[in-house]
Image (cartoon, rainbow, N blue to C red):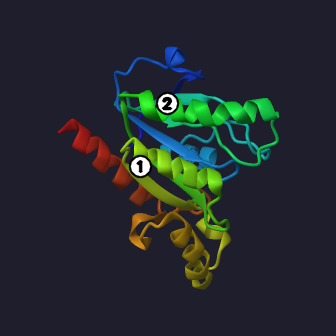
Amino acid sequence: MKIISAEFIQSATRPNNYPPTELPEIAFAGRSNVGKSSLINVLVGRRKLVRTSRTPGRTQLLNFFRVNDAFTLVDLPGYGFAKVPVAVKKEWGPMIRTYLSSRSSLRCVVLLLDIRRVPNEEDLQLLDWLEEFEIPTIPVITKADKVKRNQRGKQLRPILEATGLPRDAFTLASALDREGLDEVWERIEAVLQGDAE
């Protein structure tokens, strides 16, 4: 996909803060430090569109970005072991679930999993919600560059077992060496094309 424009719209915590539902939305979700912000920045070709940090959990709100004046990317709060107050952590689950269950313009969720980590309870909870609300999902394994190619099968096995998804459901991606980015865009474009039709 050729990116002509990408701009921040606003942040939100609840439905009455969300921007109008005039464009289809593609949301990105994953645990803290899965590389979500970096991947979004590389996908849209903007180094600092989404704020990145060495400290997990910096994304504590739903952040909306307009791309090509054609669709919206939504950066959902990271979950897991982020160094944030317990009270903030408790809000994340309801915040994400409310968005998933109520957002009529949501077309799919790009679910990010780290190739080096077995999906945890929160990853699987999110998968359950996506199934419950019948939201199309694009599963992406991030940080593929961190594992040697001959070790990938070994790293993927527990991920496939935990999620119950087949190998071909996943795209391996790396924000660092750009592996898999074209495939991620192809899958997103297919969703948007289906929406347009």
In this rendering, the answer to whether 21 lies above or below 144 is: above
| Alpha carbon distance from label 1 to label 2 | 14 Å
Q: Amino acid at mark 1?
A: Glu
Query: Which of the two residues, 180 or 132, is positioned nearer the viewer here?
Result: 132
Residue under the image location 30 percent in, 46 percent down: 191
Q: Is residue 49 visible?
A: no
Return the residue found at the far top: 16
Residue nearer the viewer, 40 or 118: 118
Q: How many marks?
A: 2
Residue in the picture at 40% in, 65% down? 169
Res 188 seen here: yes
Residue positioned most to the bottom: 150
Measured along the vertical axis of the image, is residue 62 above or below residue 107?
Answer: above
The relative height of residue 150 versus residue 93 in the rendered view (above or below) is below
As drawn, is 61 to the left or to the right of 85?
A: left
Residue under label 1, please give it: 131
Q: Position of residue 63 (x, y in %)?
A: 57, 29
Q: Secondary structure at mark 1?
A: helix
Q: Is residue 195 left or right of residue 92?
A: left
> Pointer 1: residues within 10 angstroms few (<14), some, or many (20+)?
few
Query: Label 2 crowding class (10 Å Cα cut-off): few <14, some 14-19, many 20+?
Result: some
